[in-house]
């Protein structure tokens, strides 16, 4: 059986299980991976390779690194001469030109972490949580030049639990994406792949998140909205308030039975309580700017200044 000559495009840790699944698929001949360049990481600012590149190095896979795939002559030359059947993309973070999209015989396919056409864009996982959705999933779409607008070839749904945060949901979808490779490739090899146009009336978007999006507005946000913000912004940038004009990241809250006006702050039995639009919450686990995360009780034990929450 002729194997599918395949290129994989991806960068973060999220992409690694899918790359492993591609490597382990007997119907695929992986020609190369393409990822982003090495960059400085964390406080030490040490130069590190992306996780996909690290995996490629450890497993003797051919790889390229670029921040301009559409203008990289070496990569373009390699792609054009390689007689590619398939390009698979997951979390690559670069737009891909029509020239590259047209190269593979079967197509260029993107794995997207929502059930398209819902949440096209950069942050579908976060928006599913911000909106209180009960399910999400992964979609495989044949790529076109317009972002996340291609025909759907495969999808798999995933339940969102009440306790899920962006961190746990990313972990679920990381595994789901990898597990989609086997049935997706089987559809191709059995000539059963179908292409279903996205429902234009059901399109929604999940644009790039900005730090200021995570600011809790006690007078405007309901308790449920605040809970969803904490879940959705759990990885970055963290939902936050201001305590004495310093950023106070909110890691965990719980509903309080106290009757507090929106924006009102109260300390009760060593707990920090604030009023939201339609009720009150306890700021159960917090992190003041420059400090470690801790419970509100531990924080108050070591903080002896007047507290103003905004």
Image (cartoon, rainbow, N blue to C red):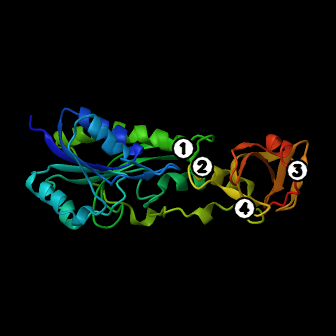
Mark 3 and mark 4: span between their CA atoms?
Answer: 29 Å
First along the sequence among labels 4 and 2 = 4
**Secondary-structure class at tag 2:** loop
Mark 3 and mark 2: span between their CA atoms?
Answer: 28 Å
Viewer-proximal residue among 191 and 15? 15
Mark 3 and mark 1: span between their CA atoms?
Answer: 33 Å
First along the sequence among labels 3 and 4 = 4
Viewer-proximal residue among 190 and 49? 49
Query: Which mark lies nearer to you, 4 or 2?
Result: 2
| Mark 3, residue position | 304
Q: Position of residue 93 (x, y in %)?
A: 37, 58
The answer to whether the residue labelled 1 contacts the one labelled 2, judged by CB atoms less than 8 Å apart, is yes
Does 123 sit left or right of 143 as displayed? Answer: right
Q: Residues within 10 Å of mark 1 (few under 14, many from 20)?
A: some
**Secondary-structure class at tag 3:** loop
Q: Quadrant of residue 168?
A: top right
| Mark 4, residue position | 221
Residue appearing at x 31%, y 44% in the figure: 53
Q: Which mark is residue 117?
A: none
First along the sequence among labels 1 and 2 = 1
Query: Which mark lies nearer to you, 3 or 4?
Result: 3
Quadrant for the N terminus, please.
Answer: top left
First along the sequence among labels 4 and 1 = 1
Q: Which mark is residue 234?
A: 2
| Mark 1, residue position | 167
Q: Residues within 10 Å of mark 4 (few under 14, many from 20)?
A: some
Query: Which mark lies nearer to you, 3 or 2?
Result: 3
The answer to whether the residue labelled 3 contacts the one labelled 4, judged by CB atoms less than 8 Å apart, is no
């Amino acid at each position: 059986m002729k194997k599918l000559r395949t290129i994989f495009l991806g960068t973060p840790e999220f992409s690694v299980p899918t790359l492993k699944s591609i490597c382990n698929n007997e119907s695929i001949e992986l020609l190369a991976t393409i990822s982003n360049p090495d960059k400085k990481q964390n406080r030490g600012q040490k130069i590190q390779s992306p996780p996909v590149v690290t995996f490629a190095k450890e497993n003797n896979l051919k790889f390229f690194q670029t921040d301009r795939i559409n203008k990289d002559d070496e990569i373009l030359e390699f792609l054009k001469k390689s007689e590619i059947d398939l390009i698979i993309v997951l979390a690559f973070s670069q737009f891909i030109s029509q020239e590259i999209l047209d190269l593979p015989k079967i197509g260029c396919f993107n794995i997207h972490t929502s059930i398209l056409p819902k949440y096209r864009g950069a942050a579908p996982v976060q928006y599913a949580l911000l909106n209180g959705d009960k399910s999400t999933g992964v979609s495989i779409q044949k790529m076109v030049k317009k972002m996340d607008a291609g025909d759907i070839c495969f999808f798999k749904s995933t339940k969102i639990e009440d306790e899920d945060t962006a961190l746990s949901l990313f972990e679920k979808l990381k595994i789901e994406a990898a597990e989609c490779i086997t049935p997706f490739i089987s559809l191709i090899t059995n000539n059963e792949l179908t292409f279903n146009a996205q429902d234009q009336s059901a399109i929604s978007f999940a644009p790039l998140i900005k730090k200021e999006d995570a600011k809790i507005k006690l007078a405007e946000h309901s308790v449920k909205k605040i809970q969803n913000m904490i879940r959705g912004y759990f990885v970055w940038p963290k939902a936050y308030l201001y305590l004495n004009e310093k950023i106070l990241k909110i890691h965990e809250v719980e509903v309080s039975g106290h009757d507090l006006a929106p924006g009102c702050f109260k300390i009760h039995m060593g707990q920090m309580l604030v009023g939201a639009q339609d009720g009150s919450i306890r700021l159960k686990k917090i992190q003041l700017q420059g400090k470690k995360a801790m419970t509100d009780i531990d924080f108050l034990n070591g903080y002896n200044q007047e507290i103003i929450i905004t």
